[in-house]
Amino acid sequence: MVNIRKLDCGAWIVMEPTDYVRSAAVGVWVRAGSSLERDNVSGVSHFIEHMMFKGTEKRTARQIAEDADRIGGMCNAFTGREATCYYIKTLSSNISQGAEILIDILTGSVFDEQEIERERQVILEEIKMVRDTPDEDVMEIISDLVNSGNAIGNSILGTPESLAGIGRQEMVDYYHEQYTCDSMVIAVSGNFDPDQLTQQFEEGLKDMPRTKTLPSSEKKPYRQSVRVNVRDIEQTHICLACPSISLADDRFHAMVLLNSIFGGSMSSRLFQNIREEKGLAYSVASMNVLSGNSGFFNIYAGVAHEKVSEAVEAIHEEMTALHRDGVNEEELAMAREQVKSSFIFGLENITSRMFNLGKNKLLLDRVIDPDETLRTYDAVTAEDIANAVGLLCPSKEFCGAAVTGRDFDLEALIRRES
């Protein structure tokens, strides 16, 4: 049974006690991500996430790590386009100490200037690592293209140029501006005392700023664009994408099932055609990349340079057939069971349950009952899938990105009729 409470400070705490496990996971979700950043501080949300572990008024960076290890905790964080999450998982008997560590880094970080300069270099190496990983790099490029200049496409890591302009003052200003109680959700799953944790966070967050105003911006219309980056690599990595729906859209479940049918599993159309039948790619898949108020449908393939044209043509073929013929009942039934199984398997991990609770409450302002989710998937019809297909533009109108070792005209391949 999920227990939802609003703290006096304005933050929400969402708790799901589970008495048959001997561990607990607690995460603090903050509505602070790259989509809220100005261009001159691009990457600051992620930079702050790193700095939270680099020393507080009570602990050095080493002491933070040692105190987490001392209680057998797994403590980490991640930054997205809409939120940052700080979390720890540990034994139930130690969850109060784990929560205290999270509260300390959230409220007491000192943003030491020497640590900032040291961590700046770490993030620059992280940027290089992504650029040296072509399948990750092409995902970053396609997100920028398909979002057509909208903030949701902002880079999470930032650029070397933007990082150079982020000093201690810019970091502290952004922290005080974005880390407010009304933008926080504490999510807890596992075996713990709800009253004790509620009181602990009530006391721990009481001095944080209470409210902030989220910026409003006019959404820019989609426009097709293409980018090819050439570098010394042995394979071509391609993404083709178009706008889709948001996490909050009523057609979300139909779109998830459509993705499973089209390219989200080993039995999917893309995998069977492009890999198994034509042997054009080792890795090929489609995916929904969804946020609280927007999203896009993405197709990825990693192929030999000389197979690029054939691979794009095969993607055209499958998208054309999808629009023309829809899906059959057998495909829908198979996708339904695959998606439901994946959903249930994820909920058998308490950290995944915590992520699910926090993300839904922060971005959708609701907690979704698992049984409701299963019923919704069971209720999706072939007509619902057809409506979801209708949300996707023809593949010749997709944005395209490639990271490759051999230059080619991707725009001509995308716009070519199948």
Image (cartoon, rainbow, N blue to C red):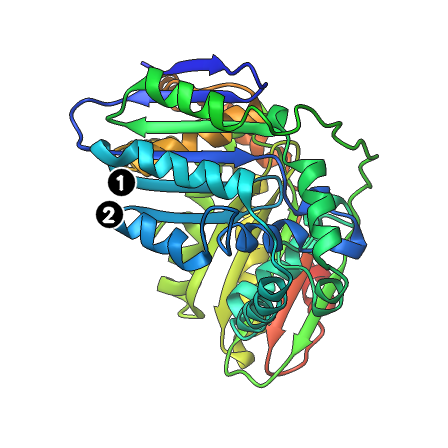
Measuring 33% from the left and 48% from the top, which residue is drawn there? 68
Please say if 118 is above or below 91: below
- Disc with the residue nearer the chain's start (2 vs 1): 2
Q: Quadrant of residue 114?
A: bottom right
Q: Amino acid at mark 2?
A: Gly
Q: Which part of the image, by quadrant, shows the C terminus? A: bottom right
Is 203 left, or right, of 395 in this rendering?
left
Residue on which the image places disc 2: 72
Identify which residue, 413 or 85, lies in the foreground: 85
Name the residue at the bottom extreme.
232
Residue 366, labelled with which disc?
A: none
Where residue 265 appears, as percent x and y from the top left, is 37, 49
Residue 182 seen in the current view: yes
Q: Position of residue 2 (x, y in %)?
A: 36, 16
Whether 197 is drawn above or below 241: the answer is above
> Up-down: is 391 above or below 381?
below
